[in-house]
Image (cartoon, rainbow, N blue to C red):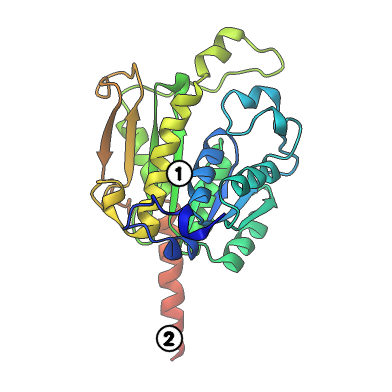
Amino acid sequence: MKKSSFFKRLPKHLRPAKLRRKSVIIVGTGSGGSMVAVHLGRLGITLILVDRPGEMLEEHNIFRHVLGYGSLGKSKNTELKRHIANLNPETKVTCIDLDVTASTKEFEALVQKSSPDLIVIATDNEESRNAIDAVALRNKIPTVGAGVYDGGIGGEVYLTRPGTACRGCIATAMNLGRQTAAKPASLDYNNLNLDEVRSTCALNLDIEQIGLIQARVVLGLLMSDSQLTGIPPEINFIVFTNHGMPAPFARPLHAEFFYLQRNPDCLTCGLQSAAAASEADRVLAAL
């Protein structure tokens, strides 16, 4: 690959040398995380891919994943690294097998050692998202997370920055603001009801639509360039409608932007802010 020609068609405001100096941890290399990894890796951004030990590509994953049958039965992490190398051999990719929920201390040690510019949250459960958010908050690292709604009708992308609303603040605000109650998690995976399974399915293009927005937001933060998104810098929550979402998001292929303020009673950043203030008081008292 000729370095001089590889980035020939890259927009001028995206400088390859600056991109190569950026590093991102992506937690979760499933359908959404893999798409974000490919878009960032193609640009030469250093990536650390984190997923649970033993996460292999299964046949039902292929319908929605960037990897195909050539990676069947193999590690998602290592196969994704190989795939990115085929797109840009200059990209540095490290694979880490780690359960961030069960091994939060190890994940925090990884974050402190690697000092990433940003963490992408691409996991599929609240426990891991909360664990990642807490580590990012303690280490003052921005995050960009996303989720696809049932049936692929749309999805959301959120971002946190040091000193602004954390994921806990954002989740609380949006749960209070939702017009319809979330469906309870009632799936019995030992006795699956096919109608229930079908109701949660999303097409690859539905997932990729949200993944593209997530990747664009990540790139905008890394480059400090609002030109990449056109989104006002204070926005920290985006809802995108793919199709068929109830009001007020009934318009298809449409985004709504929100600025959600920090909650002073937040149990996540509120407690950490109090702890920081207490430590500051202790240091001042010792002077």
- In front here: 253 or 149? 253
- Crowdedness of circle 1 by 10 Å Cα count: few (<14), some, many (20+)? many
Q: Which residue is mark 2?
A: 285
> Quadrant where the C terminus lies?
bottom left
Amino acid, disc 2: Ala
Image location (x, y in percent) of residue 212: 42, 38
Quadrant of residue 29 in the image? Answer: top right
- In front here: 1 or 277? 1
Q: Residue at x 46, y 88 (%)?
A: 286
Amino acid, disc 1: Gly
Image location (x, y in percent) of residue 126: 53, 39
Q: Which residue is mark 1?
A: 145
> Quadrant where the N terminus lies?
bottom right
Image location (x, y in percent) of residue 80: 64, 43
Compared across the picture, whether 82 is left or right of 10 comes to right
Name which of mark 2 and mark 1 comes first in the sequence. Answer: 1
- Crowdedness of circle 2 by 10 Å Cα count: few (<14), some, many (20+)? few
